[in-house]
Image (cartoon, rainbow, N blue to C red):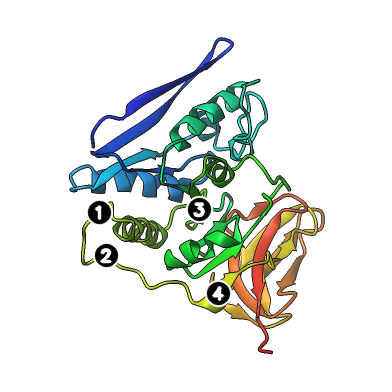
Amino acid sequence: MAKPNAIAVEFEGQRVTLPHYRLGHGSRRGLIVAGIHGREHTSIQVAYDLVAHLESAQLRGVIDIVPVANPLAYATETRESLEDGLNLGQALAALEPRSITEAIAVAMRGLVDGAEWVLDLHSAGEARYLPHVIFAREADADMAASMGLPFAILRRRTREGAREGTLSWAATQAGTRGLALELGGGIAVFSKDVARGLQTVLAFLVRQGFLEANDITTAPTESDCVYLDDVRVFVRAPGEGAFYPRTRLGAVLGQTQELGMWVALDTLQPSSVVAPCRGRLIYLRIRCRTPAGATLAMLLPERRET
């Protein structure tokens, strides 16, 4: 693999270097970013695999790839930068940096400017997500569906409740289109998720006219799997303990069907964790030891015909 360009970011004596691969030639340009959060290894591997796949391809334009957007969080395998406590995924509204993470955000905004589209690759931290697309505007629903993942969902706020500062938001502010892809496990990588993520992005590049490959295609997401409201149902840890899954990601579960076993830390007594509604399991925690209130599972409720 070719050596990346170095994007040097400095703030008040602190310095960090972002790996940046610029592939292809031409006036058109797209941007692919991973590693905004430091514990999302599937998306980071997909980004590096894209570099390896595309560096010898005949591209019709330029593809910028940043596999690790926040090396600070990557070094500590955390969602935030420990240096300033900021989440890069919510910091892109910064115009003048007040910390090292915001300085990284300003550098990322510079790459967003002039791009035709932006893909923000993520994976689920201490869990595994069923691969899907997150879009922030109803106008982007068709583009999200074209990715061909199991579902696509409109989310106007981040997990922490922010409306601004995401990479997709920055793309919109720059007058372009942006999507976030959730591509599987975070702290653990599953080869099936990596393969699907790579295929999904390559097929997107074909559809956008950046790559010629007749054998790379995806069928669009079915219309009833494109959600214009965030209807996810969360199952949270009742206290400190450990969670042991007893079902598979993607399964359709009935209400009160068992998701897994919970062992409370104070009593060491097991109990069942059950589905609060009928729906498809789209998120399952893979780190067993769990703090109180952490998300164990998410479901998409079954849609009822009207």
- Hey, which quadrant is residue 11 in on the image? top right
* Mark 1 vs 2, N-terminal side: 1
* Residue of label 3: 179
Residue identifier under label 1: 211
Residue 19 appears left or right of 296: left
- In the picture of the structure, the residue carrying the numbered disc 2 is 216
Specify which label sits upstream in the sequence, 3 or 1: 3
Identify the residue at horizontal 69%, vertical 46% (top origin).
163
Task: Give the distance between the C-alpha atoms of the residues marked 3 and 1, in whole angstroms.
Answer: 19 Å
Q: Position of residue 109 (x, y in %)?
A: 51, 33
Residue 116 placed where, x, y %? 41, 46
The front one of 96 and 302 is 96
Query: Observer-nearest residue: 190 or 193?
Result: 193
Cβ atoms at labels 1 and 2 below 8 Å apart: yes
Q: Earlier in the sequence, mark 2 or mark 3?
A: 3
The residue to which callout 4 is attached is: 225
